[in-house]
Image (tube, helix red, strand yellow):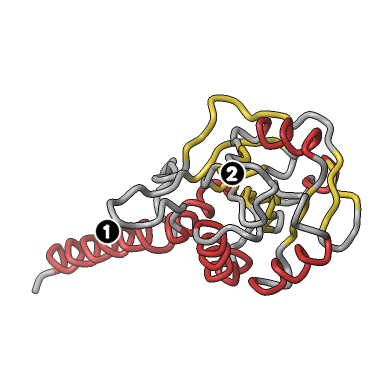
């Protein structure tokens, strides 16, 4: 093998090594976008509100700052969507906490049934799913505009004289950023014969992308 061939071979190997290094050591920058998250056109600042947490503390705008909040609206007497969604969020919570985010990620459960959901009941309910989850509630005059501000809704569809009355409510999981702004939601999957709930694996897939952009 002559010198020219050797030099050419070395140059070729160096080129291959450079390509491998570029791909695996310093991968190209790609502007990834969330696949499932429905981003609102503009971040939505929350109007001033004051609720009460399951620990009996004031929960207001300041309570949402400095963290990512996955917010779900429901009630403890809900027979299906609420416990299923809370269990799904609990299942992915260890992985959410392990993400390399500057700000922590928390789950906030907003009870829209203050008539039955006492602070004590909320504390027991949310702790059943995860000790680190937060549950909040308040009077309807505060809850209703707050929930609307999140881009969700609820309505008591029958007389509360019936102890087993149901509450209609949105099933999305809304995301509030560390500046206490609503930035979008994870909408429920709708499949025949199945509960319409937000897919926890979709949330887990998109959260690293969302949190890396802010």
Identify the residue at the far left of this view. 1
Identify the residue at the far front of this view. 161
At x 59%, y 36%, the residue is 152
The N terminus - image quarter? bottom left
Q: Which mark is residue 198?
A: none
At x 56%, y 64%, the residue is 83
Label 2, secondary structure: give it: strand
Whether residue 55 is visible, yes or no, is: yes
Q: CA distance from mark 1 to mark 2?
A: 48 Å
According to the picture, the residue beneath numbered tag 2 turns out to be 174
Left or right of 52? Residue 196 is left
Q: Which comes before the other along the chain, label 1 or label 2?
A: 1
According to the picture, the residue beneath numbered tag 1 turns out to be 15
User: At which x and y percent is residue 23?
Assistant: 35, 58
Q: Is residue 37 above or below residue 14?
A: above
Picture quadrant where residue 87 is located: bottom right
Left or right of 158? Residue 30 is left
Identify the residue at the far top of this view. 41
The crowding category of the residue bearing disc 1, from other C-alpha atoms within 10 Å (few below 14, some 14 to 19, many at least 20), is few
Give whichever of 171, 92 is nearer the camera: 171
The crowding category of the residue bearing disc 2, from other C-alpha atoms within 10 Å (few below 14, some 14 to 19, many at least 20), is many
Picture quadrant where residue 89 is located: bottom right
Q: Is residue 34 above or below residue 10?
A: above
Left or right of 106? Residue 206 is left
Whether residue 105 is visible, yes or no, is: no
The C terminus - image quarter? top right
Give whichever of 200, 148 is nearer the camera: 148
User: At which x and y percent is residue 191?
Assistant: 30, 51
Give whichever of 2, 201 is nearer the camera: 201
Label 1, secondary structure: give it: helix
At x 85%, y 51%, the residue is 52
At x 77%, y 46%, the residue is 64
């Amino acid at each position: 093998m002559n010198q020219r061939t050797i030099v050419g071979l070395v140059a070729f190997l160096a080129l291959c090594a450079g390509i491998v290094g570029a791909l695996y050591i310093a991968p190209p920058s790609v502007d990834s976008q969330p696949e499932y998250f429905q981003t609102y056109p503009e971040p939505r600042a929350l109007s001033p509100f004051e609720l009460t947490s399951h620990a009996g503390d004031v929960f207001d705008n300041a309570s949402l700052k400095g963290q990512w909040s996955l917010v779900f609206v429901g009630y403890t007497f809900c027979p299906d969507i609420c416990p299923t969604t809370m269990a799904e969020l609990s299942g992915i919570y260890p992985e959410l906490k392990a993400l390399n985010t500057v700000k922590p990620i928390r789950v906030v459960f907003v009870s829209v049934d203050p008539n039955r959901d006492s602070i004590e009941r909320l504390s027991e309910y949310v702790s059943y799913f995860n000790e680190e989850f937060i549950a909040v509630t308040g009077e309807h005059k505060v809850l209703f505009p707050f929930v609307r501000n999140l881009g969700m809704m609820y309505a008591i569809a029958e007389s509360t004289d019936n102890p087993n009355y149901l509450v209609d409510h949105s099933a999305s999981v809304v995301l509030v950023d560390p500046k206490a702004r609503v930035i979008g939601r994870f909408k429920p999957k709708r499949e025949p014969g199945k509960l319409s709930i937000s897919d926890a694996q979709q949330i887990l897939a998109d959260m690293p992308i969302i949190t890396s952009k802010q």
